Amino acid sequence: MSARKIAKSKFFFEEDMVESIGEVSDSRREAWDNDAELKVVGKPVPRTDGYDKVSGSAVYTVDKTLPNMAYARTLRSPHPHAKISRIETGKARALPGVLGIISSEDGPDVPWYHGLSRLFDRQVRYAGDEVACVAAETEQIANEALALIDVTYETLPSVVDAGKALKPGAPQLYETGNVMRGKPFQYERGDIEKGFADADVIIAETFTTQVAVHNPLEVHCSLVNWDGDQLLVYDSTQAIYRVRDAIADSLGIPESHIRVIKKYMGGGFGSKLTLGKYTVMAALLAKEIGRPVKIVLDRHEMNLAVGNRPDSVQKLKIGVKKDGVLTALSHESYGAAGAYTSDAGCSWPLRSMYQCDNVKVEEYTVYINAGPGRPMRAPGHVQGTFALDSAMDEAAGKIDMDPLEFRLKNYAEIDQTTDQPYTSKYLREAYMKGAEAIGWKERWRKPGTSAGNLKKGLGMASQIWWGGGAPPAYATLKLNRDGSLRVISGTQDIGTGTYTILAQVASEVLDIPIGKISVILGDTGTCPYAPASGGSMTAPSVTPAVRDAAEQMKAKLISGASAILEVDETALVYSNGVVSLANDPKTSIGIDKILRKMRERVLVTTGARNRNPEGYSINSFGAQFAEVEVDVGTGMVTVLKVVAAHDIGRTLNRQTMENQFHGGIIQGLSFALMEQRLMDSYTGKVLTTNLHDYKLPTVMDAPEIEVIIVSEGDPMISDVGAKGIGEPAIIPTAAAIANAIYNAIGVRIRSLPMTPDKIIRALNA
């Protein structure tokens, strides 16, 4: 049986060191041997939920309905900054079909976790900020009612550019100023001045990245219903328990009175990691009218109000010796948090990626009158890696060194931010395998030497992320007398294949066919706790808990067989769902007979994730190599191929792993070449509020993608040995493409997205 205890564990989640205290498995179980031929884990098992999704039978939150359901819509501020002096809702309430309205004028005083005193603040801080919410018989009636609400605004000066918001005399969003926390984040190690003094060459350049909007296929939505004092919430979320707890805090009700359910979700990318105001508004309206309320944001609202990847202006300074050794790294940056608390930091890659003793960082997160930032697939790392690895290529060029050789020269053997060793690191192997696959040695040439109007180039970039997982995370297994198994966990499948990999781990231990295993996720009412699905946390957190529960189940079955066969447990072996005598395989008994003899209808175990090892850093690593073709007549860039070579611990499912990398790389390509939120600086309004104006790639833009995994299971982090891969897939892509464009045309583009107009201007300059 599994040993348990309460323990403290530390881990990184989205750049923050988190310390958790919870129940962990303390079993000293051997990790799967990396040379062992596992039967199910690591194989390209088709998604167990694949049929539901391709057939259209999968029910997403946006598809969910309840009897007698009402519909809610939100009135949003047309101004980027204003005070509300009056709200008149009488005409809207008189409209036939309107059931209820809440606003700052007549709604309940509900505290909000963004640091505001109320759900509806009387001061709106961006064009799109919530003003009121209407529930009606239909969505059309709700929209008509919004137009009848009369709001008087006292407009205030606004600012939608972080650089301008930092200047003296800029409009202030808060009494404390426009800088979050009132001061910049600072980090320093070594002696930065001495480092630059020791350098033979110094590179000093400024890089900029744009605001990118999440735009998942399934929009943000919730369906809520009260049954007495019990609240049922269907929510499109990456964090069912976090949403439950935040609702409890906002409404002042016990967590036990709230049940949050999410079965399938059409993407989130970090935007759905927190509770949305829309969910609380729907809950308040449902309470008022005594009916279920569904609220679905439209694409316009998605581009205004539910989060984005903050922009960045990064001033990098690099000192390097002629032999390629880095002597100093300096990073000064600022980025926009939007109107409410977020984080625009992007310096972590510079602090940790390459070996350098002298490092200094100063970065500002700035409030502006625009929609709030939120974590977006590898927050900060995508922006920071673009700048860092672009500058690394420039430094390599200044000392006439191959960019790959330059990175190998500055390979970091330990975590420089903690002075701790890594549990595992195979970045060197990723460099070698990736370079071989792209033909780097044979095909890389000095920048700008490609002939003709269609110029080809190769570029590369490196990646570091965490993704080691952490406790607390639990999974419950229920084994039935017919030999079928149910895996239950309070994690979320956000489109990444969690249903499948949890079934694989259970199948590997218990030798039960995948077809006889069902997986239940995403329900705070029936599933044991698991963490939010962000930061590449899900697989490395939850699969060890499933294995723990499965190993306990195996031990129970052996113990039951021991009593039935009247032999000592040590004389028995378990294989293919059958317990038999080790020296007499014919003396055996199957799962179904064991349960019937034990008179058990269901055999239940609950497993827990182990704590992380102390004194080690857990990170994933990788390198991506890109080949591009640039038309110097039009400035058009075609990405021909991307090779992604990564260290991600154990591969749990080759097929879903490649799906993740393909999605991340295409999303990285989009960030490099297309995506950009555009705002009118005079009106403070977003101009790109639909998927026609906000450019995203199609399948025609997807390059050839080759995925190479250089790692094996990491036994120090868990007995499963997997690291998360959601974020690593996207981190180096934009930087690799930028370096490939430079290699093709010999001109550096330091601003994302690298659109044709920027390339033509750079070539003409």
Image (cartoon, rainbow, N blue to C red):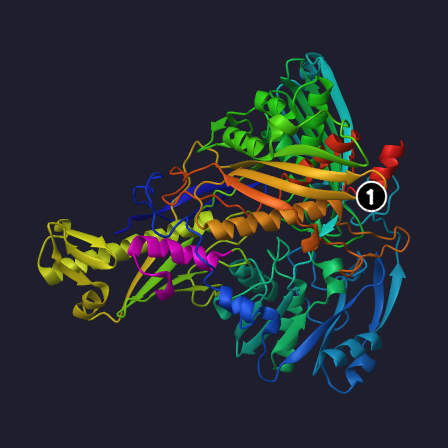
Tell me the SS state at disc 1: helix
Image coordinates for residue 562, horizontal then vertical, percent: 13, 57
Residue 708 on the magenta span: no
Q: Indicate the amino acid at tag 1.
A: Pro
Mark 1 = which residue?
Answer: 756
* 747 vs 73, nearest the viewer: 747
- Percent across and percent down for residue 719 are 36, 44
In-image side of 47 versus 547 (left or right): right
The reply, left or right, for residue 502 in relation to residue 317 is left
Measured as percent of width and height from the top left, residue 752 is found at: 76, 41
Of 186 and 63, the residue lying toward us? 63
Relative placement, left or right, of 415 versus 599 is right
Q: Residues within 10 Å of mark 1 (few under 14, many from 20)?
A: some
For image coordinates 51% across by 69% down, the residue present is 52
Rendered image quadrant of residue 252? bottom right
Q: Give the range drawn in magenta.
A: 497-516
- In terms of image quadrants, where is residue 445? top right
Compared with 54, 9 (above or below) is above
Which residue is more in the foreground, 506 or 117? Answer: 506
Task: State the residue at coordinates (41%, 38%).
Answer: 714
Q: Residue at x 52, y 28 (%)?
A: 428
Q: Quadrant of the C terminus?
A: top right
* Residue extending farthest bottom: 96
Q: How many labels does the image show?
A: 1
Q: Residue pushed farthest left?
A: 566
Judge whether residue 512 is colored magenta: yes
